[in-house]
Amino acid sequence: PHNKDKLSKLLRHHVLSGLVVSRDFNGKRLEAIPLAGEALLLDARTNPTIGGAKIVRTDLLADNGVIHIIDTVLIPSFDDAAK
């Protein structure tokens, strides 16, 4: 229970608002803002990455949006002020 806020932030760090499909970012380098608010660099110019994680599969349709699979967990900053 004492890490509930941190877990929530970790999960929201992996979610973007809206419908984002690979054609929206293919060949581009841009800043993505997940629900947790901490910007991630999305670089899809050659070997696509987001926040340093390799994007291994894109555009998997789900009932509640689109899933893009990455090869690691993205860790947001956990300062004391913003659990």
Image (tube, rainbow, N blue to C red):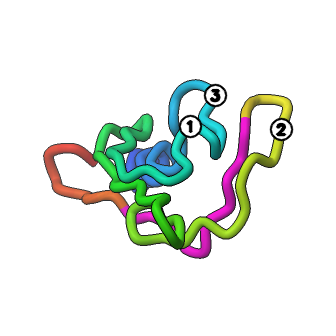
Q: Residue furthest top?
A: 18
Three-letter amino acid code at disc 2? Ala
Q: In the rendered view, does 69 fall on the left or right side of 74?
A: right
Q: Which segment is the magenta one?
A: 66-75
Circle 2 SS class: strand
Residue nearest the observer in this picture, 37 or 42: 42
Q: Rate crowding at label 1 as few (under 14), some (14 to 19) or many (20 or more) other CA atoms within 10 Å.
A: few
Label 1 to label 3, Cα distance in Å? 9 Å
Which residue is labeled 2 in the image?
62
Q: Residue at x 80, y 48 (%)?
A: 60
Whether residue 82 is in magenta: the answer is no
Q: What is the number of the mark on residue 2?
A: none
Q: CA distance from mark 3 to mark 2?
A: 11 Å
Image spot of residue 30 (x, y percent): 35, 46
Q: Nearer the viewer, mark 1 or mark 3?
A: 1
Is tag 1's residue or tag 2's residue first in the polypeptide sequence? Answer: 1
Which residue, as the protein is rendered here, is positioned at the far left? 81
**Crowding near the residue tagged with mark 3, few <14, some 14–19, many ≥20 C-alpha atoms within 10 Å:** few
Q: Is residue 68 visible?
A: yes
Q: Which mark is residue 24?
A: 1
Residue located 60% across and 35% down the image: 20
Q: Is residue 1 visible?
A: no
Where does label 3 land, which residue? 19
Q: Nearer the viewer, residue 33 or 21?
A: 21
Q: Amino acid at mark 1?
A: Asp
Q: Please provide percent x and percent y for residue 19.
A: 63, 28
